[in-house]
Amino acid sequence: MTGPYDELGLKVQRAQYELERIRGVGTVRGVTVVVDAENRLLAVHAPNGTAIHAAYRAALADKEPQVVAAMRELSADPQVQSVQFFAEANTARLEAERHARAESEEEGGAIGRFFEDSW
């Protein structure tokens, strides 16, 4: 018998699974950009797409220590650490489930691999 929390957990898992599959594609003046549901840049198709993507990754690396510094006090709070521990454990479990699901899908065929195959 499942309770309301189990049902909510299943809804969250389904939403996370669907969000992982989302890709946004935009093309302007011959430049095509692909992003995921979290607005991460996944691909750039343009004459200088590789340089654009490298600059984007460099910008992400540059801002990361600033984010860590801004979050330092909050991250040190025991209540926040407890929530982070729970979230990381849940994420690891979900990742293992997604990996298993992906392996079973690969065994059944290559459906839904448009973006992976196009890069």
Image: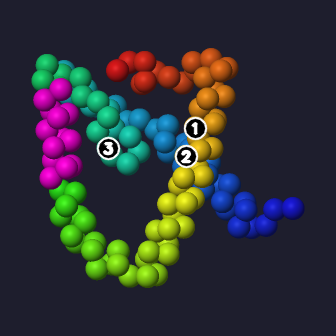
Cα distance between the residues tagged 1 and 2 = 6 Å
**Residue 117 shows up from this direction:** yes
Q: Position of residue 118 (x, y in %)?
A: 38, 18
Q: Is residue 70 depicted above or below 23 in this figure? A: below
Q: Secondary structure at mark 2?
A: helix
Residues in magenta? 50-62
Q: Is residue 70 magenta?
A: no
Q: Is residue 12 above or below residue 118?
A: below
Q: Secondary structure at mark 1?
A: helix
> What residue lies at 51% left-to-right and 63% top-to-bottom?
87
Q: Are marks 1 and 2 in contact (CB under 8 Å)?
A: yes
**Figure quadrant of residue 50:** top left
Q: Which residue is mark 3?
A: 40
Residue in front for this viewpoint, 55 or 95 = 95
- Asked if 30 appears above or below 69 in the picture, the reply is above
Residue at the spot of label 1: 99
Rendered-image quadrant of the N terminus: bottom right
Res. 99 image quadrant: top right
**Which residue lies under the disc numbered 2?**
95
Residue 38 position, x and y percent, is: 38, 48
Marks 2 and 3, how far apart at CA? 18 Å
Q: Which amino acid type is shown beneath numbered disc 1?
A: His
| Mark 1 residue crowding within 10 angstroms, few (<14) / some (14–19) / many (20+) | few
Mark positioned earlier in the residue sequence (1 or 3): 3
Q: Is residue 29 visible?
A: no
* Circle 3 Cα neighbour tier, 10 Å, few/some/many (<14 / 14–19 / ≥20): few
